[in-house]
Image (tube, grey):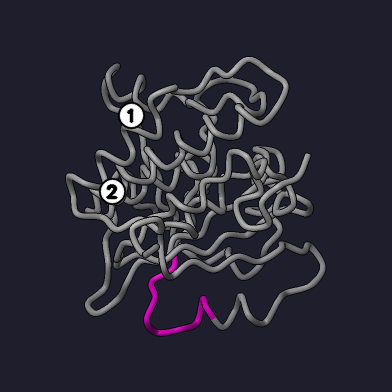
Amino acid sequence: MVRCELCRLAEKFCICSLAPSVKSNAGFLLLMYDTEVLKPSNTGKLIADLIPDSFAFLWSRTEVNPEILAVLNDPTWQPMIVFPKAYAGEEREIFDNKVTLATGKRPLFIMLDGSWREAKKMFRRSPYLQNLPVVSFTPKTPEDTTKLSSRYQIRLAANNTELATAEVAAQILSLAGEQVNADLLDLWFDVFSYQYQRGVCQQNKANPHAVFEYTEFAKLHGITLAQDNIS
């Protein structure tokens, strides 16, 4: 299969022309486990498609990339790890279903991009993350629980509450008060999922109306897509 070098989907189903152009007060730092960055099914890259200030680094257990530390220590940012509060420990500051910022700071959301087992390893074995607060979201009603059921059909997870990286980022953007960007990322995720499944030999379980719903949402909110800049 010939893949697009940018979106990593089959060239026939490339989504690059639909990439959005938006502004955001938030930043994202993705720590990617081992070969996660090479997988065409990885959804972390969808965050970078949307959020201008996105940083991505391979995680290492034995070495600390100085570029990671430079971002974490940049006074512009208030870094926080996106992770379930149940694993945070009693000594850790936790923002549950909210994002609290110091004056003049922008939120930098650290995403641990890998399987659940890999994410726990990164969380526990990264010394530079140990003193950072954790931001988490907890469903409070049955409706909230339903909303947090994953729509990710590309890889099997232990259960449908294990959200894909992009789905988690959409929830976090909502907590940060950027609901339009949160909804757009959710729709962009659906576009990716549908187009990815069109290019592989499996039944397509994604939303067949994903592209239409995404482009209509972009029109409604005045969001520029890459194809709009093509003369």
**Residue 91 visible (yes or no):** no
**Vertical side of 210 occupied by 229: above or below:** below
Q: Amino acid at mark 2?
A: Leu
Q: CA distance from mark 1 to mark 2?
A: 13 Å
Q: Quadrant of the C terminus?
A: bottom left
**Vertical side of 11 occupied by 107: above or below:** below
Looking at the image, residue 185 sits to the left or right of residue 60; the answer is left
**Most foreground residue, 137 or 26:** 26
Q: Quadrant of the N terminus?
A: top right
Q: Are marks 1 and 2 in contact (CB under 8 Å)?
A: no
Residue in view at x 30 percent, y 76 percent: 105
Q: Which residues are magenta?
A: 71-79
Q: Circle 2: is it few (<14), some (14-19), or many (20+) Cα within 10 Å?
A: some
Occupied quadrant, residue 80: bottom left
**Vertical side of 131 occupied by 216: above or below:** above
Q: Amino acid at mark 1?
A: Pro
Occupied quadrant, residue 224: bottom left
Outermost residue, front side: 231
Residue in view at x 33 percent, y 38 percent: 214
**Most foreground residue, 227 or 165:** 227
Instruction: Please give the label number shown on residue 139.
Output: 1
Q: Which residue is mark 2?
A: 175
Occupied quadrant, residue 27: bottom left
Which mark is nearer the camera, 1 or 2? 2
